[in-house]
Amino acid sequence: MNEVIQEIQPSGIRKFFDIVSTMKDAISLGVGEPDFQTPWHIREEGIYSLERGKTHYTSNSGLMELKVEIASYLKRRFSLSYDPDSEIMITVGGSEAIDIALRAMLDPGDEVLIPQPSYVSYLPCTKLAGGVPVPIELKEEDEFRLTVNELEGALTDKTKVLVLPFPNNPTGAVLPKEDLVKIAKFVCDHDLFVITDEIYSELTYNEEHTSIASLPGMKERTVYINGFSKSYAMTGWRLGYACAPERLLSQMLKIHQFAIMCAPTTSQYAAVEALKNGDADVEEMRDAYDKRRKYLLAELRKAGFDCFEPGGAFYVFPSIKKFGMTSEEFAETLLKEEKLAVVPGDAFGACGEGFIRISYAYSIENLKTAMIRLSHFASVHLK
């Protein structure tokens, strides 16, 4: 068997999810999946496409009607300009876009700067593409924001790509525009490429999201990745997209052609409806997440946890260092004693040790029950 595959560890997120599924009365705050149903008008459009017999392949790069809607959406929301015909492709979730972007750009030995804690796919996908992942440790005292100083410390003559995972999973950190301007200058000065994963771009609470691809000189060296899972509660539809300069996107499309063919047709028709008429749905869900975010922060601090205020996504990342346990020990003991599942912080990189990730993509009723259990656990174990 392939040695690289054997060395890659399974996702640390799913481990606790699988255990919870076998436990009666257990509550999981571990999986980053909206508890909302996909809005009915979006589901209805998917159903209607099946009723009309729209069950054939689309173009490899995706349904043109959907790509046109994506271009319109990105222009009005984030001031991004992409040609639907040559600079946008539809993928099977944002995860496929991450994978094929790295495979299209990396030669063996090329280094990829990966700020951590961050989504679990970046590092293994880099290895699968023959690249060398270079983790950059983000710090709680900086609100888990990426700084140019950290980039300078990680740069070598083999650095080719910077991954920008903001708004961030698992920390909820965001990068304000003034930070992005400095990072963009660094990227241009050192002739790097960027993969910006903006799947949580609609879920920011204190300020409007800015894409690095909208800054001067960045579009031509950036792969912009987004999707429908988080903003529109469409996780099971498995639909994302990538935007990039034609010379790069055409190479990504080759991989997509041979590995995937095209994204699910039904999902693509549903996504057209989401972009055309889903703004109110996004706003309603964002408001609900914001209420949950504020509730969790208040309750965590009341229970004795140190936790910075996340500005995006739907996660909090409290410190558990004062409990005298590793993240893994904390999560396992909490699950055993209180039937409450969270994700150990080190599942998102070694620097996540000493933290846990709690998702608030769950109903407020579930969160209230969970916080009663977590508060009890803290009262027993807090030293």
Image (cartoon, helix red, strand yellow):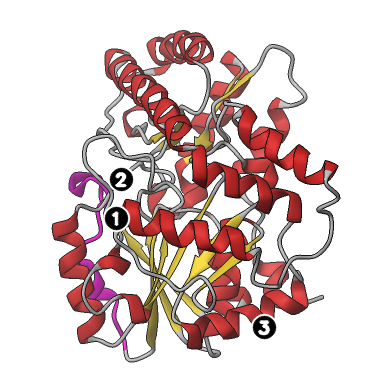
Q: Is residue 353 above or below residue 71?
A: above
Left or right: 292 as drawn, with respect to 364: left
Give the mark toward the camera: 2 or 1.
2
Q: Point out the stretch of residues depicted in magenta.
A: 138-156
- Residue 133 highlighted magenta (yes or no): no
Give the image location of residue 375, x and y in percent.
41, 11
First reached walking from the N terminus: tag 3 or tag 1: 1
- Report the amino acid beneath label 2: Ala
Q: Which mark is residue 254?
A: 3
**Label 1 Cα neighbours within 10 Å, binned few <14 / some 14-19 / many ≥20:** many
Give the image location of residue 380, x and y in percent.
43, 11
- Distance from the alpha carbon under mark 3 to that under mark 1: 34 Å
Give the mark toward the camera: 3 or 1.
3
Q: Give 9 or 234, whichever is nearer the viewer.
A: 234
Label 2 close to label 1 by CB (< 8 Å): yes
Secondary structure under tag 2 reads loop
**To which residue does mark 2 refer?**
173
- Residue 153 highlighted magenta (yes or no): yes
- Distance from the alpha carbon under mark 2 to that under mark 3: 34 Å
Quarter occupied by residue 179 = bottom left
First reached walking from the N terminus: tag 2 or tag 1: 1
Quarter occupied by residue 96 = bottom right
Label 2 close to label 3 by CB (< 8 Å): no
Q: Give 256 or 315, whichever is nearer the viewer.
A: 256
Give the mark toward the camera: 2 or 3.
3
Q: Is residue 72 above or below residue 293?
A: below
- Report the amino acid beneath label 3: Lys
- Report the amino acid beneath label 1: Leu
**To which residue does mark 1 refer?**
138
- Distance from the alpha carbon under mark 2 to that under mark 1: 10 Å
Secondary structure under tag 3 reads helix
